[in-house]
Amino acid sequence: MTHDRLAGIVILVVAGAIMLVSVSFRSVFPADPLGPRAFPLVSAVLMGLGAAWITFRPTSRTTDRVSNSVWLAVVSFVGYALLLEPLGFFVATVLAFVALSLLFGGRPVRSVLGGAVLVAALYLLFVEALGLVLPVGSLFVIGG
Amino acid sequence: MGLGPLLDGFAVALEPLNLVLACGGVFVGTVVGMLPGIGPINAIAMLIPVIFAAGLAPASALILLAGIYYGSQYGNSISTILLNVPGTASAVVTAIDGHALTRQGRAGEALAMSAIASFVGGTLSIFGLVLLAPALSQWAIRFGPAEYFALMVFAFSALSSLAGRSVAKALVATGFGLFLATVGMDPNSAVPRFTFGQLRLFDGMDFVVVTIGLFAVSEVLHDLGATDPAQRAVAVTGRVGLRAREILGAGWTMIRGSVLGFFVGVLPGAGGTIASFVAYSTEERIKGAECRFGEGEILGVAAPEAANNAAATGAMIPLLTLGIPGSGTTAVLLGALMGLNITPGPLLVERSPEVFWGLAASMYVGNVVLLALNLPLVRVFVRVLELPRWFLMPAVASLSFVAVYAVNRSAFDLVLMTAFGVIGLLMRRGGFPPAPVILGLVLGPLMEKNLRRALALSDGDWSVMFSSWLAVGLWMMAAGSLLLPTLLARIPSGATPPATAEPD
């Protein structure tokens, strides 16, 4: 089975699921002849047509594996999402930076230093200059 | 109409203080516009309080605003070209060839072309603004829901030239974008669609989250997994500028892009996005046979950059003459103008001509300063690529995190961003183009709203879609745009090899 055919079948299943869900959307207003289901259905039909075409006329040849380091990076991103609010912007961002930096072949000490410099720069730019609010970290909050 | 008021406007714009403000605005705008997810709209929105706090005269404030606006637009192009991180939907097309050039070590040329094309687009469209503003505002009003819908179908028909190798895959990507656009509470019927009970999804998919995921995050993941060094962004090996011949060679491309961008930009809505997509595909149709669009073609940078800058000026027309902001950026500008005690509308040109002409002059000065300041700086910007990968890629990721989190202060958005990063990576590997997803996401809600409005007004009668000549014309353009390439491809396929075909 080629790469394209696999992708085509997966997308067909997704498009089918979208259609099944869409059918249940009903409008209660009479002044809306098209209703809320038409657009999701059209989008699913477009996806389905393209996917059917790919499935029956696959052009791509290989199925290259996604390397483990990519999945580790994804894990570090999700970890960042979970840890940002408890650990705060500084700690969480340095951690995520170092993790990713190591995956890209950076040396540990340099990665930590690089992360610290970048986080300081981001803080100055986003918080001091642009006035955005970033989490301090609920674990460290002492006063207000 | 006399040129006297315009000259007065220039006299004000060229005062030393105002020139300093223009330079400062362009510089700050460029830096802020470079940040992923911030983009021009947010750059202006964030800097408006600063402008008011400084207590500047209205003319000076307008010049500073124009500088920030042009600067942030260009800053957005810098991150698009160098890092494949478009901050607005209209920059997504620039990413295709712009980033491909970066991969070939030609980032310097791409950035220079982007600055020059933006300048040409800005200049031509300011002439258009001065000469045609009153007439065009009438044109914009004639666009009802049916015409809008047809215009957007026309924009989608341009997708066939973005498809790269597979039209089927572009179709899937478009459908996916349109699907993402339907996620959230349906504004017409209040039915929640595809929210899976997640309250976070009721507001729909945020453009910033999807774009940063599909482009920036997937770029980082892709770079990490790329075993082939040719797939990575590389430091500049080529020249950091363009020869006069190359600039002139893009002359017609920039002019066509500007004219197209200007007229599409006048229409309130997604002007810049439609303009850049249509300009790119028009160029691909005209020059496609001799150029390599999609694989690092400098004209593929020139066309959308000229178009989206021209569209930005075009969008000023409904704002100034009708008081209708046609885009996010002009909505923010409207707020700024009101804050300066200037009420845009039909009476603006009559009652306070100095403001209208002053604005035109300040936009022009902002445009010139942008070129003068940023063209020499291209060699500085491209050095970003000389940073080691262990620093650059985590830095792009960290910037993305902060930008995405800042939108809604929601950690859920970070998870969503990561999911789109993985989807983007899989799409790249499978050869699915990401640009149509963004087009679908941005235009989808507008299409749905206009189609449903048109049908609601006509009581479900579909003939309303063809009830005006304008709509019929747009439908014909869409059909032509879809069918023409197929027909043209058929003609030379006999004896002559396609390479010698002359499409124009």
Image (cartoon, coloured by chain):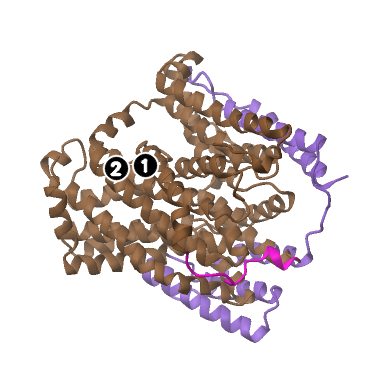
Chain colours: A purple, B brown
Q: Position of residue B486 (x, y in %)?
A: 65, 31
Instruction: Give the label on residue A82, or none.
Output: none
Identity, as a three-letter code, of the amino acid under mark 2: Gly
Whichever of labels 1 and 2 marks the residue nearer the N terminus, that label is: 2
- In this rendering, position of residue B366 left or right of residue B295: left
Q: Where is residue A66 in the image (x, y as percent from the top left)?
A: 78, 59
- In this rendering, position of residue B491 left or right of residue B347: right
In this view, B486 is above or below B333 = above
Residue A18 seen anywhere in this rendered image of the structure? no
Residue shown at the point (74%, 34%) measured from the top left: B495
- Furthest residue toward right: A1
In this view, the residue in front, B135 or A45, is B135
**Residue A1 sits in which quadrant?**
top right
What stretch of residues is rendered in magenta? B228-242
Residue shown at the point (68%, 40%) measured from the top left: B498
Residue shown at the point (73%, 31%) measured from the top left: B494
Residue A55 seen anywhere in this rendered image of the structure? yes
The answer to whether the residue labelled 1 contacts the one labelled 2, judged by CB atoms less than 8 Å apart, is: yes
Residue at the disc numbered 1: B262
Callout 2 environment at 10 Å: few (<14), some (14 to 19), or many (20+)?
many
In this view, the residue in front, B205 or A61, is A61
- Report, in whole angstroms, how far the alpha carbon at label 1 lies from the one at label 2: 8 Å
Q: Where is residue A120 in the image (x, y as percent from the top left)?
A: 48, 78
User: Which is the main secondary structure of the residues drawn in magenta?
Assistant: loop
Q: Disc 1: which chain?
A: B
Instruction: Give the label on residue B128, or none.
Output: 2
- In this rendering, position of residue B194 left or right of residue B30: right
- Furthest residue toward bottom: A109
Residue shown at the point (55%, 37%) measured from the top left: B158
Does the magenta portion include B451? Answer: no
